[in-house]
Image (cartoon, rainbow, N blue to C red):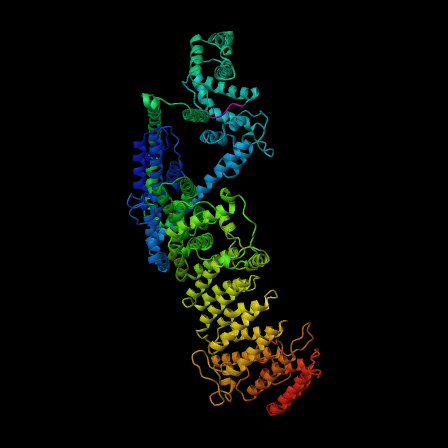
Amino acid sequence: EIEVFLANIFLKVLESPNSPMEQKALVLEALRALCSDPTMLTQLFLNYDCDFDAPNLFRNIVHSLTRLSNKSPSSSTKKDNTEDIELSLVGLEVLVMILRAFLKALNLPGGDDDAILPSPTNNGRHRLQLDIGLAVRTEEHGTNATLTDDDTASSVLSDSSKKAAHNTNQIVEAFDRKRTVQQNFETGLIKFTLSGKQGLQFFIANEFVKQEAHSIALFFHKHCDQLDKTQIGEILGREPDASFDKHVTDAEMGGDGFYVRVLHHYVDVMDFTGLVFDDAIRSFLSGFRLPGEAQKIDRIMEKFAERFTRQNEDVFSSADTAFILGFSVIMLNTDLHNPNIKQEKKMTLESFIRNNRGISVDGGDLPVEMLEGIFNRILAKPFTLKEDDDARAAAAAESTELQSMFVFDAAPFLGGNAEDRRREKFRKEKEDMMNASEQLFKRRPKKASSASSKNVTGTDDIKPSEVIKPMFDVTWGPLIGTLSQVLEITEDHNSIALCLNGFVYAVRISSHSGMSLARDTFVNSLAKFTTLGSMKEMKYKNIESIRTLLSIAIIDGEFLAESWGPVLQCISQLALLQLSASGLARDDEFLTVDHPADNTPESGGFFRTPTAEELARETEESNGRAVLAAVNEILIDKVFSSSVKLSARGIVHFIEQLIAVSVTEITGDGKKSLVGIGSAAAVPGNEKQSSKRIARHSKSGDRPRIFSLQRLVEVADYNMEVRPRITWTQMWEMMSNHFATIGCHKNAQLSMFAIDSLRQLSFKFLEKPELSDFNFQRLFLRPFLLIMENPGSREDIRELVLRCVDNMIRLLSRNLRSGWKIFFSILALSARDPSEKISTLGLAILQRLLDEHLDQLCRLSDGADDVITTPENSNVNTDPAELSASERKRRNANAEDFVGLCRASLSFVQTEELAKPLPIGLSMRALCHTACYADLIAEQKVLPPVGHSQSIDPFSVGFTYPGLPEDQGEQMALWRPLFDGLAAGISSTARSNSGGVGCLVHRGSIMTTRAILLRHGKVFSPQQLRVLLQHVL
């Protein structure tokens, strides 16, 4: 009964152009009630769309509603147009009802909304404000739902739940198989239309039919309404010796004569018993179109004549008579109904009788009454195919419609019969519905009852939430087209609110169901309707689209993934509009290099026509004012502040897309990307491509923006304290590369902003001491090193980096741990900088570090306390074997930092000739530092590493001289960087002349070595002195 009412009555009434408005409204009311219940919808889907032998009722409902909602008013009367609009609106409402039922089944926000269609007091804007209000208050619903699902999944399932899960999997797999079969069948129909043989080969390969003549004949009968009837006729009329498969000899299986066997089986399954001759031909020709060749028609009609004569021996005693008359009847049908034949030349009854004289047995004539009946019936009703009739009816309706546009229609005023004709057509349609319903009841009573009993046991235990994903997969394709088309053409506030709610619900369902293609499609489509980035004047629906997009970002941001891209692009353009409207300076104007003003006098005087640029500026200002009044800036801030509630995976997606949008802003491609919606994500591995784009832009004159870069700084600030360090490290790895790339930009303001942002974030990050065994500081400060290493960085930028390092050492040295390594590497790079200013500043920072912060660098404590190492409280005399694991790691880390400090100082000793020699005083001051370092080592204020003695890798812990016992080798691990640096100075190739004295670096290095050995020689063993003699002196 469900199939009869829905498929044969409700949907046909809904789609009929002749059914009255009242009946369509009743059908929509019934569908509204059905679609508001998730259980009813899912049971309908499970019992019909997942059943191979049943129609796709749920899909048919969705498609009928989308066709109704897409229908444009086309009637010539105002009343009919109004009714069409009302029906389209209600149809759209039912579609959104389906989405709301999905949300209710998934226990997501929106599933319990009281009303979909806004009332006059609850217009679309108020409706969307409620959604955004939910976003501002809380975004925890989706997270909680996810956690609940995980907890349920992790719990032990009962027997009944396991059975339900098994049934769900089976039914969903059945649906997937059915959909695959239907898709393959539709593909086969296309192939069959293009080539009958290739189409049959596809059907055979996909097991729709066997390669047997009888099977193919039945296949033609079963699917005659779907298969191309011209191709069927061509196959039935093929030559007697034609084969389907040259490798087969049996005619029944595809060998020579295969097509004739198909024709014979096709005709032999037809029943012509008791039919009038022309009605038998009419029934016979309803399944295919006769081919054009006379020989093919002969073969087909010959077999028909044989079958008809055998079943009606009292009509014709010979098949030849039936054959000749059949051929004559076909010619009569063509002659009478061919529009190219003039009326006076058409065949008359007398001509038809005369043409058929003497065709009976022994030259006799057929009864005149028979021939007259055939002639009159064909004259009244020609032989036609159903699709030809439908095409003619549609063409006639279109022609009438066009005429009504240009010709005055007096029927509405004079009581014409147009409405009567429509009623008569619908009366015939109702008769067809009743006949089809009656046939359906007669054909499937037993099968339906058995199937229903089987399905009830399999589907009653299935929860609606378990099948929402395949149901939405059926729905979202036609739905996106409907929502987009309606939103494109409508200006009605109720329709706009319905469409935007549909977008919100669809994005939410697809996001939570893991359907990325559907989610991206809906978000991209909605982003286009904002018209941000274009020069179009914004309307009400465009502004509401912006508000809706912000609502989605706040409420459903956890699941947006790559769809964050178009959302953040729209927010970027939205912020630009708001700046324009508020009269504040735009960031792209602030960051643009000033060009000479164009003082060319304007021409045209008072009546001058505005230029295209002026018109675009006016439109932008107008849009900005509209946006500023309608969109609260707090919502934009909320999008970024809500990032703290994203999961570890969610925040990574968010930052990836925010970086990608920042790249488009800096390269000046923000509007271009928004027009295309959906640029390449800044996924790991795309950093090099982004860097190249930024580098290309830095050489051009485009106007960069820093809105997204500012927001990236805010997101880093929001998340720094709330994220676990592991998650934060993953986030910062992406952000740091972006900051480092922008820090080397040719635009001075842009690069300085990036470095200043790094400085602010670094100060906040370093306020929290780093625990031992971690390297988060080194990872965080790495962008400063990347900027210093970049050969394209400017001198003022490198100076700014050094100033930042100096400030951090001055104020936060007590919290520094692994960050020292980055600072020492930066200072070592400054020693080799071609700028004297940079090198001098770098050495000054080193000197200040030695004067003021050496105690922080030499301590042995972890981050939990601030005890400073002294000879009294250090573990100098402790047996290394007695040290705990944490003490050993801490001691090795301190030794490694000290080695880095030594190498940084000795980097300033000039060891080779430079194109632009640095002042010799830098080398001399650096050599003075070594005396301080030697004192620290000798007084054991810095202890050597433990258990890491090696002489292979100079940049690893414990690098020492070879050939020494392990304990002596460990002791020399602190001395070796000093002596290696001094040895490099002794063998320097630089001339280093000053004040008439030559070879100052050589002299200074050898004298410093001599002083160290004289002052601290007693701490070295004979073996250690021998190694120094061999490797240094």
Residue situated furthest front in the rendering: 605
Residue 324 screen position, x and y as percent? 51, 14
- Magenta segment, which residues? 286-291
The correct choice, above or below, for 750 with respect to 23 in the image is: below
Say whether residue 799 is visible: yes
Residue at 54% x, 35% y is 201
The chief SS type of the magenta part is loop
Q: Nearer the viewer, residue 808 or 31?
A: 808
**Rendered location of residue 301, percent (x, y):** 51, 19
The quarter of the rendered structure image containing the C terminus is: bottom right
Q: Is residue 848 magenta?
A: no
Whether residue 455 sits left or right of residue 945 in the image: it is left
- Dividing the picture into quadrants, the one containing residue 702 is bottom right
x%, y% of residue 762?
48, 70
Which residue occupies the foreground of this view, 677 or 454?
677
Q: Position of residue 537 (x, y in %)?
A: 44, 45
| Residue 818 in sight here | no
Determine whether 330 is above or below 288 in the image: above
Which quarter shows the N terminus? top left
Q: Is residue 368 above or below residue 486?
A: above
User: Residue 287: within the magenta?
Assistant: yes
Relative placement, left or right, of 330 versus 431 is: right
**Above/below status of 746 relative to 841:** above
